[in-house]
Image (cartoon, coloured by chain):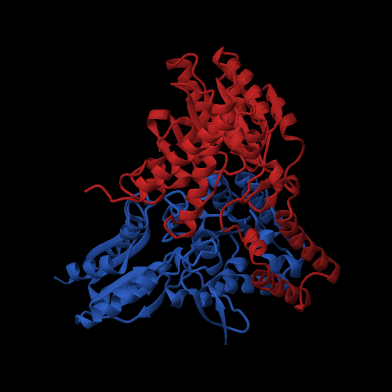
Chain colours: A red, B blue
Amino acid sequence: MPMDLWALYGSTLKSRLFEEAVARLWYDGLISGEMHLGTGEEAIIAGVVTQLREGDAMALDHRGTAAMLMRGVEPVLILRELLGRPDGLCGGMGGHMHLFSRKHLAASSGIVGAEGPAAAGYGLSAQYLRPGAIAVAFFGDGAMNQGMLMESMNLASAWKLPVLFVCKDDGWAITTESVKVTGGDLVERVRAFGIPTADVDGCEVFEVWEAARSAIERARGGQGPSFLHARCIHLEGHFLGFPLAQGMSDTIREMPRTVLPLAQSVLTPGGAALRERVTGMKTFLGTVRSALNDPRRDPENDPVRRLRKALPSDPERLRGLEEQVEKEISRALESALGEMPS
Amino acid sequence: MRTLSFTQAVDDSLAQAMAEDPRIILFGEDIELLRGKLLVRFGPQRVRNTPISESAFLGAGVSAAMSGLRPVVELGMVDFVGVCMDALFNQAAKVEAFSGGKWTAPVVVRAPCGGGYGDGGQHEQCLWGWLAHVPGLVVLVPSTPADAGGLMLAALQHDGPVIFLEHKLLSESWLESLGSGGRHTVKFDVPDEGTRGAVPEKWEPLPIGQAALRREGGDVTIATVGVGVHRALEAAKALEEEGTSAGVLDLRSVAPLDRSAVCKAVAGTGRLLVVDEDYEGFGLSGELAAVVAEAGIGCQYARVCTSTTVPYARHLEDQCLPNTKRICAAVRQLMQ
């Protein structure tokens, strides 16, 4: 299957516009709980998912909306699910962290790392029941330190399971910088399981697509699992309303509320020596600063924008495609917000 | 007396203990930000972030406790305990028994629990019954800031593993981070009495395993914990207008259970209603029925619990979790 840039752009744009609509509904209070968007990782999802076919399975994390959409789940069904409606994808029972589509063999989990064992099992059933089919696991760099994911890689390697492990590495495990809690190199780690690896820029859909192509071919051919490490950014941080991002959007109101109690803690009698306390203060502010000023959030690194730039020049085709995607999303939105069926 | 929010009270009590006992260290997911005040006051050696590796860091907390430290290990949510259950039920809970009583693991596991803000069934569980099922684990579920601080101090002084659960509806900071995310467009049924309240200037440990009678009542005893306490109090007020006198017993600790307080109250009223946000089957509600039956107390019994996976949709969730309406209906049924 050759790479189709226009189709890839269509997929990433659809996902982006969809999630921007989701964000608006969330801010309006129509969607409850946390909201983890996949904005910024669309090129990774598109580069892999557009190469899947009937019988392939997906093990998704708490950020699975983009993968569901690109796999072909009806946008309106996901929207209704997020709105908690009985006619949603999962009857309003799951929400965005727990999207399930049996038809697409696609299941999500909000438990970090759970995608590993899930993909191993899908791979196992593919070996028996659907030779040539594969399983994909999508997870973040935080999950790479979960035992169950490492165990699954070993299992997949030992049993030559047709699994593609995809690490969407944005450098953060919730609000913790991964580098501060991770020993060694992630790609090296996986290589030690005897699994072939590829390390790509996840903002470049070509790189992802090419690496995924050979990994998927390998898995379909019965040669076992592969690992795709793709660096990316999350444009909205870990989740919407991310405490750190709030400080950024409303610095004057939020920062004193955050920093004043800390300043008091430097002076409270009892506790560490002053030097230690200053180090503590630096640790805290350092985390806030590096999250807020993540240089990778430069719009130039937006994968959808990059892909758009890389398209062959054909303004008419581009306009047509964008209009079509916009229409599809607004139709889904209208329909999702419409009357509940009686 | 000062006024503090629920989570401030826990952190304040922790700070008092940390200032007195250098063996107390804190680690868990994202706690450098969550416990910023403690990080600054006690330094990064005593307050540190972990990778998302619950099996490793909770397991390490258990053996660090066995070898001289007093770790307080934080899980992002009690739901995530599934990932590292072995450290609790096969390791921490067994140390004292296996060593013939010669060794213990005084680790405190702190975790937010509970629902009511639309996060779905993998992030809103209570699980205290499941944890309390295993001999050797203490499971505390405070319902007010004063109890939260006092019980945290008690947990730190307890010579064995303690699981300390903070309900997210009672915790301003958790609800803000997970429920509202800075939005003013969402509302939650938050029991005000549980979220902010008077606390002592200097914390004293509360006795573990001692229930508190929050409201006297002659017709029926409602036994409950956590947010259930506030729902039961609200129901009791409504029932009073109908002429039914409902007492509310806040168990505060699921394990150990204050059996005598339960028996005493039920012997007086002859009716027991258990309000439990945890799952209905094989849990606290059934355990309380067994407690009164074993004591030979005849009573009418009913329970209002969570009997299914907690739905994501807010309106379904509100029906699934114990609410005042369901409590009132159950009491009326008992009174017939």
In this view, A211 is above or below B66: above
**The one of B194 and A75 positioned closer to us in this rendering:** A75
Q: In which quarter of the image is the C terminus of chain B?
A: bottom left
User: Residue A316: in sight, yes or no?
Assistant: yes
Q: In this picture, is A264 found above or below B111?
A: below
Using the image, determine if residue B251 lies above or below residue A30: below
| Left or right: B40, with B330 as reference point | right
Rendered image quadrant of residue A112 = top right
Q: Which residue lies furthest to the bottom in this view?
A: B1
Residue A186, horizontal then vertical, whole percent: 72, 34
Q: Say if residue A144 shows up in the picture.
A: no
Residue B248 placement, left or right of B135 = left
The quadrant where residue A303 appears? top right
The outermost residue toward the left is B336
Q: Which of B199 and A30 is in front in this view?
A: A30
The x and y percentages for residue A116 are 56, 33
Residue that sits furthest to the right in the current view: A275
Of residue B153 and residue A139, the one placed in the foreground of this image is A139
User: Where in the figure is residue A137, as x and y percent of width and height?
Assistant: 55, 31
Q: How many marks?
A: 0
- Picture coordinates of residue B223, whole percent (x, y): 34, 69
Q: In this view, does A330 lie above or below B150?
A: above
Asked whether, in this view, residue A107 is left or right of residue A137, the answer is: left
* Residue furthest out toward the front: A316
Residue sitting at x 49%, y 59%: A27
Look at the image and tell me in which quarter the N terminus of chain B lies.
Answer: bottom right
| Residue drawn at point x = 86 percent, y = 67 percent | A275
